[in-house]
């Protein structure tokens, strides 16, 4: 699934090459030359992943990672550190500061894209292309289809994203505020009742196959996807890609 990426690199040529390759791979890419320029972009809306050069003018990439990890809003932001520093000590410093992965320059576009996709699958599974199947439902982000057996269900764009997130985090209760952040984006300011409206639409779409009761309201807390299919007596499993 296409992801939103922020590239922070001081080298204009490297920045443009990375942007070009990621755009060709289907991702939406924003870029900045240093931490100061990246700050307003991060405030406007968190990307799905940050690709960050270590050696920046002003605040270093390493210092920026530490600062982002200290803030609740950006604590879980997936970050890949990029640097020509190839020493083991440098890699350890970056990972201990909070980077999720480390790529040594120069690197090929295929390796970069593979690393990005691997991290997205680990940290934000609902943003990846992996299909998921449970309780008799199959959701495929690649084809944007939800099926119950041979029957295809008709979901709106927001309802699809909502179900995608819930099915990738089964049995976990998510507050309305959390769902707004994860499904609509942390840069969007909407009333929490917006979530209730779209949950209602999602249930209506799932009612066609009798799956509406898998979207459970947890009083005073939020919503969750109930993965267990009591009638079929089976649990859930990830669908083969």
Image (tube, grey):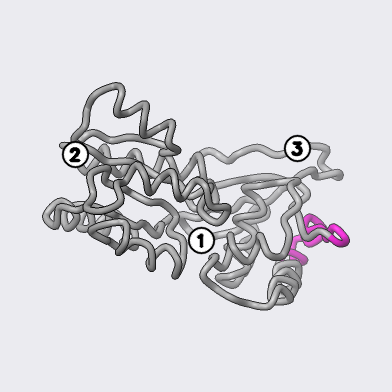
The mark lying in front, picked from 1 and 2, is 2
Task: Give the image quarter of residue 185.
Answer: bottom right
Task: Give the image quarter of residue 27.
Answer: bottom left
Disc 3 crowd rating (10 Å Cα; few below 14, some 14-19, many 20+) is few
The reply, left or right, for residue 71 in relation to residue 24 is: right
Which residue is tagged 1?
144
The residue depicted at 53 percent of the width and 38 percent of the height is 240
- Residue 65 vertical position relative to residue 183 in the rendered view, above or below: above
- Of the numbered discs 1 and 2, the one sitting upstream in the chain is 2
Q: Residue furthest left?
A: 13
The reply, left or right, for residue 39 in relation to residue 226 is: left
- Of the numbered discs 3 and 2, the one sitting upstream in the chain is 2
**Image x and y of residue 160, in percent:** 59, 64
User: What kind of element bears circle 3?
Assistant: loop
Q: Residue furthest front?
A: 58
The reply, left or right, for residue 48 in relation to residue 189 is: left
Which residue is tagged 2?
108
Q: Residue furthest top?
A: 88
Residue 110 visible in this rendered orientation of the protein: yes
Task: Report the disc number at residue 235.
Answer: 3
On-image quarter of the N terminus: bottom left
As for residue 74 lying within the magenta part, the answer is no
User: What kind of element bears circle 2?
Assistant: loop
Front residue of 115 and 190: 190
Write the start and end of the magenta stretch as one range: 206-220
The residue depicted at 70 percent of the width and 39 percent of the height is 236
Q: CA distance from mark 1 to mark 2?
A: 30 Å
Disc 1 crowd rating (10 Å Cα; few below 14, some 14-19, many 20+) is some
User: What kind of element bears circle 1?
Assistant: loop
Front residue of 236 and 43: 43
- Residue 17 vertical position relative to residue 177 in the rendered view, above or below: above
- Residue 89 vertical position relative to residue 2 in the rendered view, above or below: above
């Amino acid at each position: 699934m296409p992801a939103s990426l922020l590239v922070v690199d001081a080298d204009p040529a490297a920045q443009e090459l990375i942007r070009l390759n990621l755009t060709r791979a289907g991702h939406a890419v924003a870029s900045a030359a240093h931490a100061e320029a990246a700050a307003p972009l991060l405030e406007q809306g968190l990307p799905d992943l940050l690709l960050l050069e270590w050696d920046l003018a002003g605040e270093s990439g390493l210092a920026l990672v530490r600062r982002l990890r200290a803030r609740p809003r950006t604590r879980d932001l997936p970050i890949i550190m990029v640097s020509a520093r190839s020493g083991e000590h440098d890699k350890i410093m970056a990972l201990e500061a909070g980077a999720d992965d480390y790529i040594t320059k120069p690197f090929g576009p295929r390796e970069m894209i593979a690393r990005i996709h691997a991290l997205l699958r680990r940290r934000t599974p609902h943003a990846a292309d992996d299909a998921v199947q449970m309780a008799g439902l199959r959701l495929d982000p690649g084809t944007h289809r939800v099926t119950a057996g041979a029957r295809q269900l008709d979901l709106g764009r927001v309802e699809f994203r909502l179900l995608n997130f819930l099915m990738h985090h089964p049995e976990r209760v998510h507050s309305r505020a959390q769902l707004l952040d994860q499904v609509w984006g942390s840069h969007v300011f909407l009333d929490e009742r917006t979530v209730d409206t779209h949950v209602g639409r999602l249930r209506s779409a799932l009612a066609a196959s009798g799956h509406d009761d898998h979207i459970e309201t947890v009083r005073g807390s939020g919503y969750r996807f109930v993965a267990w299919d009591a009638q079929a007596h089976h649990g859930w499993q990830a669908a083969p890609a």
